[in-house]
Amino acid sequence: MKYTELRTKRLELCPHGMKYLATTYEYSSDVENTKYMAFLPDFSMEETKTFLTECDAQWEKEEPEFLEFAVLRDGIHIGAVGIYWNEIRDTLELGWILHPAYHGRGYISEAAKAVIEFAKTQFGVCHFIAHCDTENAASRRVMEKLGLELVQRSGGRRNKGSDQERWDYLYEAIWDRG
């Protein structure tokens, strides 16, 4: 896939990868910041390195399985937004993470809107979903700001940082291509 850079009023989004190893590890290994996340925290720099190596590889593929964007504010890496294809490539799952020093300023909503528009334009995908732990109020607010609607509550969620079974919310939106 060709190198892609997106810009919003306050942010720059670019392909996420090894270039951002130290800053990614800083927020992805933060146990409090990732307590509601299924695949985090990273317990070692090696875990972060493995993920970012795969991010770099996905950006090189003609048909990637996912694309992860680094989110920058004034040139500082503050988080990431990703899109993940389903098996038949007609639905994209959204995911995001933000360094805790930047919470509560609308950065993830702004970045995710740009990624959604990119996906609609670049790939023609108009069906989006997102999951979150039912206690993750911040992610729920982002999903609602994006126009996704709550469609399901289910059990059986396992967050990496906890051995406790959790509840999961599924949000969804289907938009017109135009």
Image (spheres, helix red, strand yellow):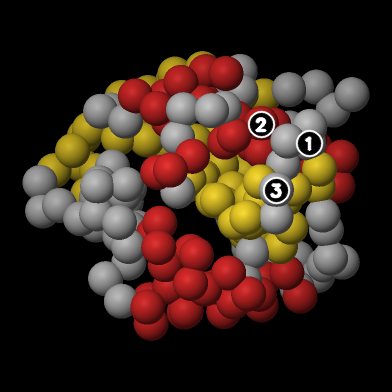
Image quarter in which the C terminus is found: top right
The quarter of the picture where residue 132 lies is top left
Residue at the image point whose x is 79% and y is 32% from the top: 9
Residue at 57% x, 27% y is 106
Q: Amino acid at mark 2?
A: Glu
The answer to whether residue 119 is above or below residue 23 is above
| SS type, badge 2 | helix
Residue 9 vertical position relative to residue 43 in the rendered view, above or below: above
The residue identified by callout 2 is: 110
Pick whichever of labels 1 and 3 is earlier in the sequence.
Answer: 1
Specify whether residue 44 is in view: yes
* Secondary structure type for disc 3: loop
**Residue in the foreground of this view, choosing between 165 and 114:** 114
| 82 to the left or right of 124 | left
Looking at the image, can residue 90 be seen? no
**Of pointers 2 and 3, the one earlier in the residue sequence:** 3
Residue at image mark 1? 8
**SS of the residue under disc 1:** loop
Q: Quadrant of the N terminus?
A: bottom right
Q: Is residue 152 left or right of residue 23?
A: left
Q: Amino acid at mark 1?
A: Thr
**How far is disc 1 from disc 3 in space, using C-alphas?**
12 Å
**Which residue occupies the foreground of this view, 170 or 49?**
49
Query: x%, y% of residue 165?
Result: 13, 43
The residue identified by callout 3 is 74
* Residue 104: x %, y % from top left: 46, 27
- Residue placed farthest to the front in the image? 74
Q: Nearer the viewer, residue 161 or 105?
A: 105
